[in-house]
């Protein structure tokens, strides 16, 4: 009994440490992106991927386990049925972004909490998972100067905020090869955008439109996987996952005002409110999404896979207004290799080495120019010493993504980025029944 109490105290300490880390990250990480492309739609869509999957280019639809270590793959809830130990994953992300247009370049750095996820086996064939992670982020500030007659006019655009996703899901294995699963997701957050028109002369009457959408509502995602043996130690998995085109509730606050600036360029109190909407009830439509994947793996050694994805963004609306987006599609290719997961003599042989590539035609089109995104990723899974007589396992997952979005053609902006993702994964037998006190 005393041994059980000691183990329970350790587990409470684990949970307390994770909660402290999450609270600290949430308090420090307020600005999460600096991208003019986040102005469109719901912002930059983050995707339900942990660092270990981002390192493989984002492949996840046909992935459930690689080297026997339990990972949480909320992108396809059918994978939960492969979870055999209580699993916790918590992490953060940071990114360095460089924006280029004509001969101008601007660089920014942002960091944020990225995820907190749990998975618990319910039976030998099923498991439950729940957690919270970002759904999208919004952050930009830029200015265009145009000439009307002989007067220079500045057009200012600003946005901030984003959406988060809390989910709970269940996965079940039918027979020896078929897995099914589903997530119930609550998506919530605030999207704040501002557009202003300013004249160069001091004391001129300027105009500003401020729009805030407070979003909250349920959505659903689902998945299926089928695996079969193609060799003595080699197997293939086929996977599909998707999400429905759900509607989220939105409370809109809108103000159209006139204002001026003083001789020092400071904004004065609004001169007049031309129009306003307080607590206007509306909705926001999410896109229907489809993901298809295939992977081949050799137990405890390697995995390679590919994903194809598509989303019906053209049907998306905000406040019952079509967002002017186009349908998107993308593909990923990647894999993982572990030289010897059971090696006692070489730590580097127990490390997971991951590599991946991705390409996306995004939902944005400007001046008849499709905005495309491409990137490469490299990552590692560093195992830590086991605990509790070998019943608890730990791993640090680190990923670097390098890529670009957009183009300098047609007077557009090219965005180049380096993203870093860090996650801590715990596997433990928290709910095993002990026969002897």
Image (cartoon, grey):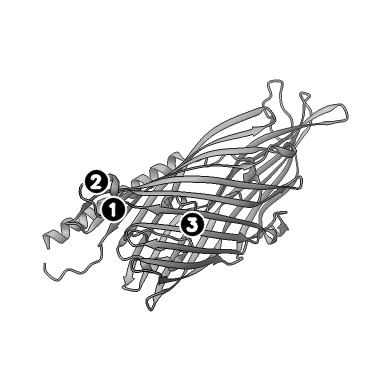
The image's mark for residue 59 is 3
For mark 2, does the 10 Å Cα neighbourhood hold few (<14), some (14 to 19), or many (20 or more) residues? few
Measured from the top left, where is residue 228 in percent x and y? 41, 72
Disc 1 packing (10 Å; few <14; some 14–19; many ≥20)? some
Residue furthest to the front in view is: 231
Residue 266 located left or right of residue 340: right
The answer to whether the residue labelled 2 contacts the one labelled 3, judged by CB atoms less than 8 Å apart, is no
Mark seen at residue 346: 2
Residue 77 visible in the shown view? yes
Q: CA distance from mark 1 to mark 3?
A: 23 Å
Where disc 1 sits, the SS reads loop
Residue 63 in sight from this viewpoint: no
Image quadrant in which you'd find residue 410: top right
Labels 2, 3: front one: 2
Where disc 2 sits, the SS reads loop
Closest to the observer: 373 or 303?
A: 303
Could you tell me if the residues under marks 1 and 2 are in contact, i.e. CB atoms within 8 Å?
yes
Residue 409 location (% of width, % of height): 72, 38
Sequence-wise, the earlier of marks 1 and 2 is 1
- In what quadrant of the picture does the C terminus appear? bottom left
Mark pair 1, 2: CA separation: 9 Å
In x, y percent, where is residue 11?
25, 55
- In the picture of the structure, the residue carrying the numbered disc 1 is 340
């Amino acid at each position: 009994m005393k041994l059980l109490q000691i183990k329970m105290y350790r587990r409470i300490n684990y949970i307390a440490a994770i909660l402290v880390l999450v609270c600290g990250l949430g308090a420090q990480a307020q600005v999460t992106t600096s991208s003019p492309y986040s102005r469109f739609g719901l912002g930059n869509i983050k995707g339900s991927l942990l660092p270990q999957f981002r390192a493989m280019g984002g492949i996840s639809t046909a992935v459930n386990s690689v080297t026997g270590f339990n990972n949480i793959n909320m992108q396809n809830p059918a994978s939960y049925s492969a979870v055999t130990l209580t699993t916790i994953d918590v992490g953060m992300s940071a990114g360095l972004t460089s924006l280029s247009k004509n001969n101008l370049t601007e660089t920014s750095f942002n960091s944020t909490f990225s995820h907190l996820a749990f998975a618990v086996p319910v039976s030998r064939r099923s498991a439950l998972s729940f957690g919270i992670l970002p759904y999208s982020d919004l952050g930009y500030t830029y200015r265009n100067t145009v000439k009307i007659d002989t007067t220079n006019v500045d057009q200012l655009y600003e946005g901030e905020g984003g959406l988060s996703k809390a989910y709970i899901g269940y996965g079940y294995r039918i027979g020896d090869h078929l897995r099914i699963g589903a997530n119930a997701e609550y998506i919530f957050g605030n999207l704040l955008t501002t557009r202003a028109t300013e004249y160069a002369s001091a004391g001129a009457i300027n105009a500003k439109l401020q729009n805030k959408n407070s979003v909250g509502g349920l959505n659903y995602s689902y998945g299926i996987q089928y695996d079969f043996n193609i060799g003595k130690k080699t197997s293939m998995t086929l996977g599909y996952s998707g999400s429905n085109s759900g509607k989220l509730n939105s409370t809109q606050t809108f103000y159209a005002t006139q204002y001026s600036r003083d001789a020092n360029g400071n904004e004065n109190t609004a001169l007049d409110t031309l129009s306003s909407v307080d607590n206007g009830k509306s909705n926001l439509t999410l896109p229907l999404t489809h993901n298809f994947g295939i992977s081949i793996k050799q137990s405890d050694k390697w995995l390679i896979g590919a994903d194809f994805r598509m989303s019906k963004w053209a049907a998306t609306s905000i406040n019952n207004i079509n967002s002017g987006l186009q349908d998107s599609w993308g593909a990923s290719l990647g894999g993982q290799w572990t030289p010897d997961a059971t090696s006692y003599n070489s730590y580097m042989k127990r490390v997971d080495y991951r590599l991946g590539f991705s390409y996306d035609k995004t939902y944005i089109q400007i001046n008849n120019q499709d905005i495309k995104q491409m990137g490469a990723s490299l990552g590692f899974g560093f195992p830590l010493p086991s605990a509790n007589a070998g019943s608890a396992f730990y791993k640090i997952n680190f990923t670097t993504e390098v890529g670009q979005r957009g183009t300098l053609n047609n007077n557009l902006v090219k965005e180049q980025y380096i993203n870093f993702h860090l996650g801590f994964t715990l596997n433990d037998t928290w709910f095993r029944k002990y026969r002897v006190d």
